[in-house]
DNA sequence: GCCTACATGTAAATAGTTACATGATTGA
DNA sequence: TCAATCATGTAACTATTTACATGTAGGC
């Protein structure tokens, strides 16, 4: 799944709550997802256009927002069409091809409140498997070349490995919580506090 | 600094030790740097070509390696030219524009054994400052929109923030070690064990 | 004989950023 | 009135991956 498709999904998810302008979408995207992919307008607006062309979104010029009694020109609110809602629902119910990729996982995770427990578990476990494989791959390939590396390079590797290990631990906690307290869609309500 | 320039620097660093084939460079690149940017040949070979055109590298066809008594055809060994060595030395002595970026930092760090203590400290501190800024930015922008996010999104943010915080701690340790045990170029020798 | 790893390269497609162009609104 | 933020969009450029094309060497 290319980043663009991830972006499409993320936008679908955001607009499920309420219609938004492109500018607002960009800001939310910057704050919702981990640390913290900035997204250029050069990516965003073409993507929105594509989605409108695909009939996933409809556009509304102005006054969708009562606040804006004053004459603000040239802002466009994007709203999910029925096709868009259907697409989102389908994505949410599926494992989502490659929800294990870094970007895609973050987007999927940020929409966990809109999915059911079984899907959440599938995604968490898929991600965990993926990371464990990575760990395996890397540490075995490392053994073969260990002596070629000096102390700094070795430290860099150790640190990188540690990061991935921590990521796995985090997932393990989430999986455990999800198993011990499964629940349905929980939009806006809380999972058992994972801290 | 675009990724390509980082790649150029990384290649310069690797070839400082010994001449290598493109294929070997790719493998080493995959194992030396954190977890673990795979690099396609479609990036690598054009980059090597560019470097040859810029006179940073010279090419040698075959038999530079005594082992290869048998007739292995069509392998090309790349070796640093004097200009290449000079360029590497210049890069190593400089802060290197944007050594604070994620990719660039990893590459610079992996070559710490070839630099002096003062440069190492400049780079570590620059990186630390950069990350601290990121932390600041993000947590302040988060405060403004906190209530719009559900529990999963909040958890994702918490986790992202924690990762960056840990990275800062790691740097602090390295900086402390570097300060308490400064030393010159340490190619192939060890820094105080940072574990 | 076949699979895996070694080995080099290019063309086409894809993705993404930067810089530009434009203009309104808000608050100091 | 000046700066910041809101707001939309495109064109040119840069970067990068994927798929293809081609062949050797070593082990089972």
Image (cartoon, coloured by chain):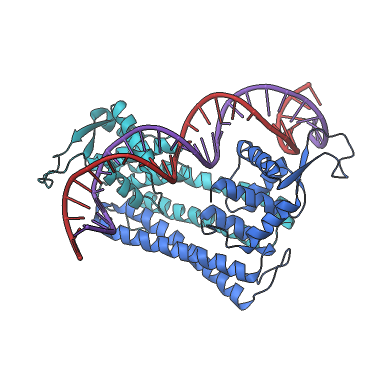
Chain colours: A blue, B cyan, C purple, D red
Q: Is residue A129 above or below residue C12?
A: below
Q: Is residue A31 visible?
A: no
Q: In the picture, which quadrant includes the C terminus of chain A?
A: bottom right
In the image: residue C2, left or right of residue A187: left
- Of B9 and B21, nearer the camera is B21
In the image: residue B185, left or right of residue A82: left
Q: Is residue B44 visible?
A: yes
Q: Position of residue B32 (x, y in %)?
A: 34, 50
- Of A28 and B195, nearer the camera is A28
Q: Position of residue B67 (x, y in %)?
A: 12, 47
Taking the spot 61% from the left edge, 39% from the top edge, the residue there is: A43
Taking the spot 76% from the left edge, 44% from the top edge, the residue there is: A58
Q: Quadrant of residue A59?
A: top right
- Of B183 and D26, nearer the camera is D26
Q: Quadrant of residue B22?
A: top left
Total labels: the figure holds 0
């Amino acid at each position: 799944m290319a980043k663009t498709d991830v972006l499409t999904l993320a936008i679908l998810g955001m607009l499920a709550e309420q219609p938004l302008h492109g500018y607002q979408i960009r800001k939310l995207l910057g704050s919702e997802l981990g640390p913290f992919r900035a997204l250029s307008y050069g990516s965003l607006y073409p993507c929105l256009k594509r989605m409108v062309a695909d009939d996933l979104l409809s556009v509304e010029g102005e006054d969708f927002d009562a606040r804006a009694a004053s004459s603000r020109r040239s802002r466009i609110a994007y709203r999910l069409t029925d096709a868009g809602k259907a697409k989102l629902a389908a994505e949410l119910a599926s494992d989502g091809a490659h929800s294990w990729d870094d970007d895609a996982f973050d987007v999927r995770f940020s929409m966990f409140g809109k999915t059911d427990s079984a899907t959440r578990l599938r995604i968490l476990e898929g991600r965990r498997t993926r990371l464990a494989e990575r760990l395996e791959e890397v540490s075995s390939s490392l053994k073969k070349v260990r002596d070629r590396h000096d102390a700094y390079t070795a430290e860099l590797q150790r640190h990188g490995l540690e990061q991935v290990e921590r990521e796995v631990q985090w997932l393990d906690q989430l999986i455990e919580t999800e198993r011990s307290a499964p629940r349905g869609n929980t939009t806006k309500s809380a999972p058992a506090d994972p801290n």
